[in-house]
């Protein structure tokens, strides 16, 4: 039976069919839906961990206990999980362990654009790259088999296009969920230096065996065509090659670490010239050139952003590849006249978002805002424009302390802003650092009771697990007090006067402060009884104060403020900022 599945859903299905017992991860686009889909299958265990490092450590323990394991995260999450990953390459596994790294070429939802194939190279672990949903599903089982055969964690490297595109997948019946026997083996699993030196030798021996395996691995194969051009490619780029250069000979690499050197040499000997087509860094190209094979790649195609058939055809056509010119000609012949370009639509916080009042207040108070990763990062955009930094998950608190230590004059002007899930991910240690090292930072926890940016996943503070079971809620205030913060308070972000008063008082205090700004995400708990706000046209003086909130329900029409009732959540922030009383909750007669 075939079913139309996204790459992420296909991986979940592949894990189910391959007998995976335990799945762990941290939500992050484009990887989130893998575990969400996996959690729906029977007879498995799946969990959201506080961060990616913990997820991989849970996966390591489950593997050592004998289970087949799936660990998922986006590309920057592997940075967080790198510590256990490097050591797992030494210890190896018991039950198969597959680490999914969902990379994000084009930075659709990420702060950087790293190529995580290099993690596989550094760790000397196998890396598989699917090109579509069917390969994504199949490579889960293959990766687990490789993991157990060679005693190694295996990376399955996705990109956004593979994660979120849909294609038909052949479904199979799930295999048995059996545990491999556990046996005590400190020489293998206790990585003190003496044991580590022994496992280092094993690592090299395993790499040599993997190189031999790669030569006959079923996901590395040649499609002979016109031998005047040979293309070496992997991942989604394979489909672009087949579209733009349909007659070229192609070496499709599904196992991209370690590379099949003999296969690559044989392919290169059979064609007149070699072109390497891959997204992001010249991972394949550099290694192919190191073999002494002349190859073109990143001199023709960019090492940043997503590839596309159109971009590939344009660049290759300019470089003199006639097949690409044919593609361009065919595309141009079939293309109708282009419409007028659509206006840009920058992302905004939802109408009624509890974060909006926070950033309005921080901007009003002219504070320096050390920000973090989440929906609230949108507070950096106009008209709120109230965030000064955003580095990585959990960095807001440490960065605020660094500002204060570098320039004490900034201490009474700086706040750190971080979400509840992000705080539990990697912000707790930053708060500990503030207290331990005598900082005075004011930290605002934007507690909207969910991990909202990636689609409303549970976290340790929500009281529910990924499997929908009730769980104890982390008491954020108690955590702050436990690490030594004395000034802890909770405020409602929809009460602007209360919020402003709290921020002023805590910023002025000569010691650390912890403000929990608590209101559930309005998409989860929308007040359906709330009336939309209406505008009194006679009273409105077109001052634009309400527009400074950046609410998508508020606009200007015919020289007056206008509320689109169908968008208005009735939160009342605009009523609080209007100094003329022109905004009131009077129903939707102004829609």
Image (tube, rainbow, N blue to C red):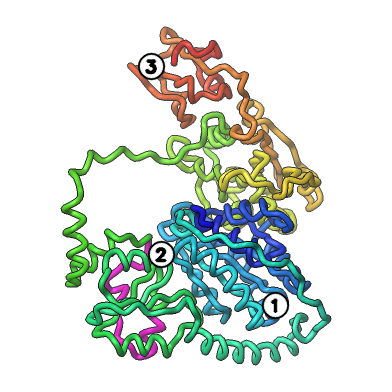
Q: Which residue is mark 3?
A: 560
Q: CA distance from mark 3 to mark 1?
A: 66 Å
Q: Calculate the distance from the C-alpha at mark 3 to the C-alpha at mark 2.
A: 50 Å
Question: Which quadrant holds the C terminus?
Answer: top left
Q: Quadrant of the N terminus?
A: bottom right
Against 278, residue 16 (above or below) is above
Does the magenta-highlighted stretch encompass residue 294?
A: yes
Residue 159 x %, y %: 47, 62
Element at label 2: loop
Q: Is 391 in front, or is 72? A: 72
User: Which residue is outermost to the right?
Assistant: 184
565 and 144: which one is in front?
144
The answer to which of marks 3 and 1 sits earlier in the sequence is 1
Using the rendered image of the protein, determine whether residue 498 is visible from the camera's viewpoint.
yes
> What is the crowding at mark 1: few (fewer than 14 residues within 10 Å), some, or many (at least 20)?
many
Residue marked by disc 1: 93
Residue at x 48% of width, y 67% of height: 130
Point out the stretch of residues depicted in magenta: 285-305
| Residue 209 image-quadrant placement | bottom right
Residue furthest toward the front?
Answer: 1
Can you name the residue that lies furthest to the top here?
538
- Residue at mark 2: 236
Q: Quadrant of residue 294?
A: bottom left
Whether 470 is drawn above or below 260: the answer is above
**Which residue: 38% across, 22% down?**
556
Q: Foreground: 62 or 558? A: 62
């Amino acid at each position: 039976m075939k079913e139309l599945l996204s790459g992420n859903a296909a991986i979940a299905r592949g894990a189910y069919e391959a007998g995976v017992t335990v799945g762990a991860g941290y939500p992050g686009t484009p990887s989130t839906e893998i575990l969400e889909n996996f959690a729906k299958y029977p007879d498995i265990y799946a969990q959201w961990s506080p961060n990616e490092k913990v997820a991989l450590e849970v996966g390591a323990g489950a593997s050592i206990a004998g289970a087949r394991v799936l660990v998922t995260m986006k590309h920057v999450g592997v940075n967080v999980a790198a510590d256990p990953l490097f050591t797992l390459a030494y210890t190896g596994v018991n039950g198969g362990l597959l680490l999914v790294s969902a990379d994000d070429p084009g930075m659709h939802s990420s702060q950087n654009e790293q190529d995580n194939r290099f993690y596989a190279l550094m760790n000397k672990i196998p890396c598989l790259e699917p090109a579509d949903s069917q390969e994504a599903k199949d490579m889960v089982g293959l990766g687990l088999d490789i993991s157990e055969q060679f005693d190694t964690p295996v990376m399955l490297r996705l990109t956004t296009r593979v994660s979120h595109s849909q294609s038909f997948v052949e479904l199979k019946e799930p295999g048995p969920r059996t545990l491999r026997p556990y046996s005590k083996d400190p020489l293998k699993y206790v990585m003190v230096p003496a044991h580590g030196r022994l496992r280092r030798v094993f690592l090299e021996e395993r790499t040599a065996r993997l190189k031999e395996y790669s030569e006959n691995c079923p996901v590395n194969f040649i499609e002979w065509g016109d031998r005047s051009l040979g293309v070496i490619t992997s991942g989604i780029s394979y489909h672009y090659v087949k579209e733009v250069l349909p007659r070229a000979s192609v070496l499709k690499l599904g196992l991209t670490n370690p590379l099949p050197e003999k296969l690559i040499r044989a392919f290169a000997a059979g064609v007149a010239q070699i072109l390497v087509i891959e997204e992001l860094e010249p991972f394949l190209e550099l290694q192919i050139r190191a073999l002494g094979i002349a190859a073109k790649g990143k001199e023709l195609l960019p090492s940043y952003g997503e590839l596309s058939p159109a971009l590939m055809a344009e660049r290759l056509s300019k470089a003199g590849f006639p097949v690409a010119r044919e593609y361009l000609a065919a595309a141009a012949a079939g293309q109708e006249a282009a419409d007028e370009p659509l206006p840009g639509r920058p992302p905004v916080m939802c109408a009624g978002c509890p974060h909006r009042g926070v950033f309005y207040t921080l901007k009003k108070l002219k504070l320096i805002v050390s920000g973090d990763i989440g929906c609230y990062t949108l507070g950096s955009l106009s008209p709120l424009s109230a965030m000064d930094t955003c580095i990585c998950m959990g960095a807001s608190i440490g960065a605020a302390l660094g500002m204060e230590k570098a320039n004490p004059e900034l201490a009474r002007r700086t706040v750190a802003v971080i979400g509840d899930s992000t705080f539990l991910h990697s912000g707790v240690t930053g708060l500990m650092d503030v207290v331990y090292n005598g900082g005075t930072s004011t930290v605002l926890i934007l507690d909207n009771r969910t991990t909202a940016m990636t689609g409303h996943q549970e976290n340790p503070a929500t009281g529910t697990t990924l499997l929908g079971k009730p769980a104890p809620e982390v008491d954020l205030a108690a955590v702050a007090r436990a690490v030594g913060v004395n000034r802890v308070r909770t405020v409602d972000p929809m009460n602007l006067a209360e919020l402003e008063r709290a921020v002023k008082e805590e910023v002025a205090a000569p010691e650390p402060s912890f403000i929990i700004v608590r209101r559930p995400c309005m998409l989860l708990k929308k007040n359906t009884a709330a009336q939309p706000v209406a505008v009194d046209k006679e009273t409105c003086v077109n001052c634009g104060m309400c527009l400074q909130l950046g609410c998508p329900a508020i606009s200007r029409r015919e020289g007056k403020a206008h509320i689109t009732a169908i968008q208005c959540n009735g939160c009342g922030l605009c009523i609080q900022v209007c100094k003329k009383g022109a905004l009131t909750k009077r129903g939707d007669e102004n829609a």
